Amino acid sequence: MLFSKSFGYALRGILYVALAQSEGRRVQVDEISEKLGVPRHFLGKILNRMVKEGLLQSVKGPYGGFALAAATLQTPLLKLIELTDGLGTFNNCVLRLHACNAVNPCPLHHQVMDIKNNLQHMMMGTLVSDLMIGDREAFIRSIATEELDGLLQKITNHDEHDA
Amino acid sequence: MLFSKSFGYALRGILYVALAQSEGRRVQVDEISEKLGVPRHFLGKILNRMVKEGLLQSVKGPYGGFALAAATLQTPLLKLIELTDGLGTFNNCVLRLHACNAVNPCPLHHQVMDIKNNLQHMMMGTLVSDLMIGDREAFIRSIATEELDGLLQKITNHDEHDA
DNA sequence: GCATTAAAAGACATTGACGTCTTTTTTAAA
DNA sequence: TTTAAAAAAGACGTCAATGTCTTTTAATGC
């Protein structure tokens, strides 16, 4: 697994807020977690972190919720990694050898460095806005867990089978 | 972190057995774990797994220990990943979306697929034997944790600084 | 002020990766 | 046959990532 689950939740959450933003409204954690199929309170903490780091704005109380900060759409995904997993993802030795570097490389150092560099450049060059697509329904589907639909489908089929 | 710690231990363990093999001897877990700076019992279990999967051979009792199986030097690293982390590493969605695929891709699907493909091809094309280098000392250094030396160094420098 | 809404904060639980310890089994040598 | 060496097996412990629940704080409308 390249990145943590927290990174995934952060990105998907921000993308959902961006969608709502494009419709001119704020969203609450309840709506986000429900639509995306993501744990409510865990997501809350992650969005909280994003607020502290300046990627999101939040308003408490009635008619409150989350909105994007001004620069968020132009934020590279690398920034999100930095806030969730940390940049060790790209810098640390794949074998976790502390002494591994260009002078004293681990057996996989060079091969893996190439790939980690590619990954880092991709994450640096990809902005949040690059991930938004026009069709609202397709967009939501592409960031939703979609486990519920699948389960319901299975249960339904199973019931029919039983009947 | 691309791969698990277990993968790292497995690879480093096998490489150390290969080194001993090239010197015409078997090695015990005690020596491997000591020389590499890896937890004794945990490593034991991993080597055990490698025996079951046919990458290593083991002999119990006095003068026993581990040796390479015939084909191990020609084994691609991908096989090792398969035995430790599983191939989900290369196949699963980076955002852990079960429904993510080419038809209904997550926002990062295509970019990440390219990189995961590169990684997989590299691991398929790299054999255990490709990671062995001639100089015995340099080879051991490149797969050893080397935390102890580093710490001693730091403590020494620190003491000098204090004095 | 009071009630309501929603984020923020923090205590607590769960899980899997990682690690340790003890006992059992197998093998070889004396 | 006994003893010692070493892997194998399995119980148990630890920790960080993940997830849940409750309480607190802040904002809004009446």
Image: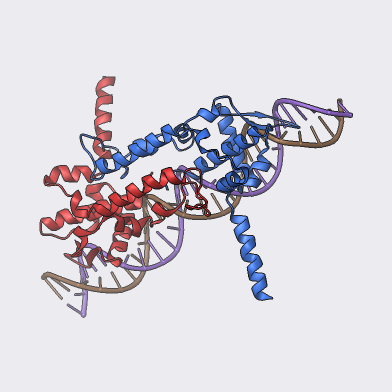
Chain colours: A blue, B red, C brown, D purple
- In the image, B93: left or right of D25? left
Vertical side of B7 occupied by A49: above or below: above
Q: Is residue A88 left or right of residue A159?
A: left
Residue C11 coordinates in the image, percent (x, y): 62, 41
Q: Nearer the viewer, residue B18 or D29?
A: D29
Q: Position of residue D7 (x, y in %)?
A: 26, 64
Q: What residue is drawn where x is 27% and y is 29%? A: B154
For the C terminus of chain A, give its image quadrant. Answer: bottom right
- Above or below residue A4? Residue C14 is below
Is B147 in front, or is B139? B139
Residue at x-position 11% and y-position 44%: B135
Q: How many marks?
A: 0
Residue A24 in the figure: left or right of residue B44: right
List x then y, in percent, for residue D30: 89, 29
Residue B96 seen in render: yes
Q: Is residue A124 rendered to the left or right of residue D6?
A: right
Q: Quadrant location of residue A30? A: top right
Q: Relative to residue A162, is residue B42 depicted above or below?
A: above
Indicate the quadrant where residue B160 lies: top left
Q: Nearer the viewer, residue B23 or B86?
A: B86
Does residue B39 appear anywhere in the picture? no
Residue A157, horizontal then vertical, whole percent: 63, 68
